[in-house]
Image (spheres, helix red, strand yellow):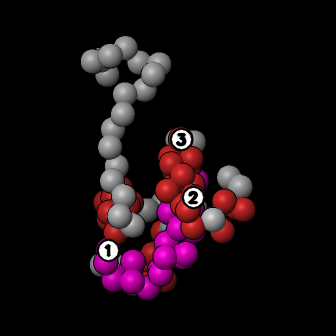
Amino acid sequence: MNQENLLDADNLDGYIAAAFATDDPSSIARALGEVARTRNMSKLAKDVGMNRSALYRALSGEGNPEFATILKVVKALGLKLTPVPNAHCKSGTL
């Protein structure tokens, strides 16, 4: 992912969406971590109930955060995960 996008505060949501589009867990965690750092990692850590260093590690792209942690971070960033049907899947089938 292009690091330049991180500097554009108006594009942070798009940056996260692009990370989720990769289907790569480490890219998703890393993007959430980058956005968290731009917003205030200490406050986010408090909001999700983790210490700051543990949250940095979880969102480094090197760790393997629990799905519950990802959900808490997404919510604390003011976002919402919503399942959307994949265009390649038949409607109504899994």
Marks 3 and 2 close (CB-CB < 8 Å):
no
- In the figure, is residue 3 to the left or right of 92? right
Mark closest to the chain's N terminus, 3 or 2? 2
Q: Which residues are magenta?
A: 26-48
* Mark identifier at residue 21: 3
Residue 89 occupies quadrant: top left
Q: Is residue 37 above or below residue 90?
A: below
Q: Earlier in the sequence, mark 1 or mark 3?
A: 3
- Mark 2: secondary structure: helix
The answer to whether residue 1 is seen in the rendering is: yes
Q: Are marks 1 and 3 in contact (CB under 8 Å)?
A: no
Q: Residues within 10 Å of mark 2 (few under 14, many from 20)?
A: few
Front one among 19 and 4: 4
Disc 1 is placed on an element classified as: helix
Q: Residue furthest front?
A: 10
For disc 1, the marked residue is 48
Q: Position of residue 2 (x, y in %)?
A: 71, 55
Which structural element holds mark 3? helix
Name the image quarter holding residue 61: bottom right
Q: Is residue 80 above or below residue 6?
A: above
Distance, label 3 to label 2, CA atoms, is 15 Å
Instruction: Return the x and y of residue 40 as percentages of the image width and height.
Output: 47, 81
Observer-side mark, 2 or 1, equals 2
> What's under tag 1, amino acid-wise?
Val
Q: Is residue 83 magenta?
A: no
- Classified by dominant secondary structure, the portion drawn in magenta counts as helix
Give the alpha-carbon distance from disc 2 to disc 1, as whole Å.
23 Å
> What is the quadrant of residue 12 in the picture?
bottom right
Left or right: where 38 falls relative to 48: right
Residue receiving disc 2 = 11
Q: Residue at x 45, y 75 (%)?
A: 55
